[in-house]
Amino acid sequence: MAHEITFEDPVKAAQFAEVDLTALAQDIAETRALCEATDSPVVYSHNDLLAGNILVLGEATLEGEAVSLEGEMLQVQLIDFEYSCYGFRGFDWGALRGGRRRQACC
């Protein structure tokens, strides 16, 4: 279906020509198979879990990748919930780890 798309604008046509639709279809199929194998339930999700939306309460010290409060329990608070809705469990942590951001929710 996407192979039938044409553009009169030569710039858009050139950009579209660079898209590997076969590879994209393969990526979608692989991702779908992984999602089905994971059996991830739908839960209420933040959907905008960027580093700037995580508040660390207290003075944190960085040691490698770990964050500690010198022996105290690390406390964090999430903020900025305008994109919250139901989504797959793990989406927020995967997006945070991958540095990706979902543009629209629901």
Image (cartoon, rainbow, N blue to C red):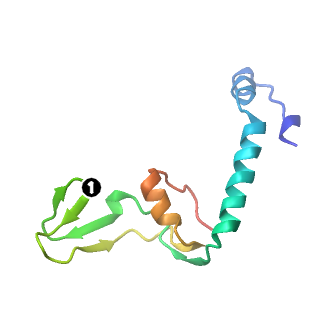
Residue 22 position (above or below residue 55): above
Residue depicted at 12% across the width and 66% down the height:
59
Please identify the residue farthest to the front as the structure is shown: 37
Mark 1, residues whose alpha carbon is within 10 Å: few (<14), some, or many (≥20)?
Answer: few
- Residue 100 x/y as whole percent: 49, 51
Quadrant holding the C terminus: bottom right
Out of 13 and 45, give the one closest to the viewer: 45
Residue depicted at 65% across the width and 73% down the height:
39
Q: Is residue 49 left or right of residue 34?
A: left
Secondary structure state at the residue bearing disc 1: loop
- Residue 22 x/y as whole percent: 78, 38
Out of 78 and 23, give the one closest to the viewer: 23
Q: Is residue 59 left or right of residue 77?
A: left
Q: Quadrant of residue 88?
A: bottom right
Residue depicted at 72% across the width and 60% down the height:
33
Q: Is residue 41 left or right of residue 79?
A: right
- Residue 54 x/y as whole percent: 32, 65
- Residue 17 x/y as whole percent: 75, 26
Q: Quadrant of residue 35?
A: bottom right
Residue 38 position (above or below residue 100): below
Quadrant holding the N terminus: top right
Residue kind at label 1, given as amino acid type = Glu
Out of 8 and 85, give the one closest to the viewer: 85
Q: Is residue 46 left or right of residue 14?
A: left
Residue 105 position (above or below residue 23): below
Q: Which residue is mark 1?
A: 65
Out of 93 and 37, give the one closest to the viewer: 37
